[in-house]
């Protein structure tokens, strides 16, 4: 099996495991001027480490005035080894399939890293009760 086929299979498996909350994704904080493999990561980057200096990184790059780019990168010893990337709105059929896969991975990783699903659950629970919603403000400390 070729590397590109194998890596796409691994991304699909990673997507399924991420949906089950069975992957420990770590958000990467990227400085504005720092680039990851030639792409300026303005919005989001996360990585899962597998040990033995091997990891997979997912990055969403929102370039002003240009289509968004998503990429997943196989890394070894902190260096990129292989990358699957796709641009939003592409007309290339193969790249459209990559965009679909990468978008699904990105959305699940964003859910895991930000825990937005847990926040929604907390709000739903509060709103479904007959109780008053919201916490009292913290008392102001005067000096």
Image (spheres, helix red, strand yellow):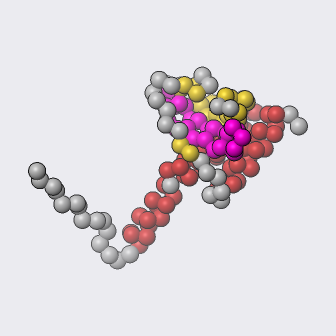
Magenta run includes residue 57: yes
Horizontal side of residue 35 vs 79, given as left or right: left
Residue 9: x %, y % from top left: 78, 44
| Residue 139, above or below 3 | below
Horizontal side of residue 20 vs 44, given as left or right: right
Magenta run includes residue 40: no
Residue 43: x %, y % from top left: 49, 36
| Residue 20, above or below 33 | below
Horizontal side of residue 88 vs 138, given as left or right: right
- Inspect this view and state whether residue 89 appears: no
| Residue 64, above or below 58 | above
Q: Residue furthest front?
A: 52
Name the residue rendered at 81%, 39% in the picture.
Answer: 6
Please state, as top left, top right, bottom left or bottom right, where the N terminus lies in the image. Answer: top right
Residue 139: x %, y % from top left: 18, 60
Residue 14: x %, y % from top left: 70, 49
Name the residue rendered at 82%, 37% in the picture.
Answer: 5
Q: Give the magenta part as a residue range.
A: 41-64
Name the residue rendered at 23%, 61% in the picture.
Answer: 137
Q: Residue furthest right?
A: 1
């Amino acid at each position: 099996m070729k590397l590109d086929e194998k890596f796409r299979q691994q991304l699909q498996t990673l997507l399924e495991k991420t949906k089950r909350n069975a992957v420990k994704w770590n958000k990467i904080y990227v400085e504005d001027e720092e680039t990851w493999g030639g792409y300026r990561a303005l919005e989001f980057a996360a990585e899962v480490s597998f040990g033995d200096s091997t990891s997979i990184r997912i990055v969403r790059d929102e370039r002003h005035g240009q289509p968004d780019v998503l990429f997943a990168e196989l890394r070894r010893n902190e260096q990129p080894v292989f990358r699957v990337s796709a641009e939003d709105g592409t007309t290339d059929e193969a790249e459209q399939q990559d965009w679909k896969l990468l978008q699904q991975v990105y959305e699940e990783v964003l859910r895991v890293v930000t825990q937005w699903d847990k926040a929604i659950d907390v709000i739903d629970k509060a709103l479904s009760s007959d109780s008053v919603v919201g916490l009292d403000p913290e008392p102001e400390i005067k000096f």
